[in-house]
Amino acid sequence: MMRAATVAMALASSALGIGVVACGDSKPTADARKAIDGRIPDAKPIDAAVTADASLKMCFSNYDCPASEKCYAEPNTFDPKCVAGPRGTGAAGVACTTENDCASALCVEAATGQGMKCSDRCAGPQDCPASLPRCVNVIGEMMCVRPL
């Protein structure tokens, strides 16, 4: 659901003529590196049960993850990662309540009064359902979004 907020902010910024820049630097900071190396005494240990089953790679949609994983963000975070688990099955235009309902992991706001709908990648508007008729670049990913 947090990706829906990210998409909404990106669309609003785009409509206002404000540039949207995606951050993708995956290199850890010096402090993070120290924590990973165990040099910070109060650093929390990595949960081996989670890391053994998932790549924990940052993602925007399921297309960024291995086939055995899904793109998932913990509630109230903007930090989606590839985690082990089944993917949703909803195609673009199908009603959704969370990213877990959609094959793409993209559950976005549709036109006013239509609730949330699964989105998907697109090359042009012909690839989008009537409820999400526009194909726009949202943080480097071409996807179907609601009408203006």
Image: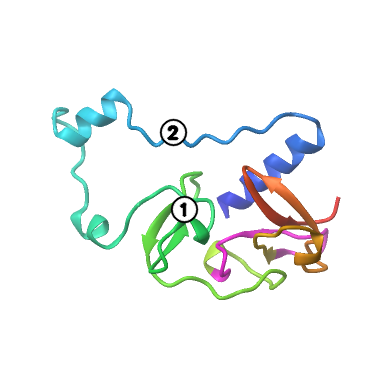
Describe residue 110's horizontal placement relative to residue 26 as left or right: right
| Amino acid on which the number 2 mark rests in the picture | Asp
How far apart are the two marked residues, 2 and 1, measured between alpha carbons? 18 Å
Q: How many neighbours does mark 2 have within 10 angstroms: few (below 14), some (14-19), or many (20 or more)?
A: few
Q: Find disc 2 in the rendering and name its residue.
A: 25
Question: Secondary structure beneath disc 1?
Answer: loop
Q: Residue furthest bottom?
A: 89
Q: Find disc 1 in the rendering and name its residue.
A: 73
Q: In the image, is residue 103 part of the stretch drawn in magenta?
A: yes
The quarter holding residue 128 reads bottom right
Q: Mark 2 or mark 1, which has the lower sequence index? A: 2
Residue 100 % position (x, y):
52, 67
Looking at the picture, the colour scheme in use is rainbow
Residue 116 % position (x, y):
70, 63
Residue 122 % position (x, y):
70, 60
Work out whether residue 102 or residue 43 is closer to the camera in this orientation and state it: 102
| Amino acid on which the number 1 mark rests in the picture | Ala
Residue beneath the point at 55% across and 62% down? 105
Q: Residue furthest front?
A: 123
Question: Secondary structure beneath disc 2?
Answer: loop
Relative to 49, does residue 14 appear above or below in the rendering?
above
Give the position of the N terminus as an image quadrant.
bottom right
Start-end of magenta stretch: 101-116
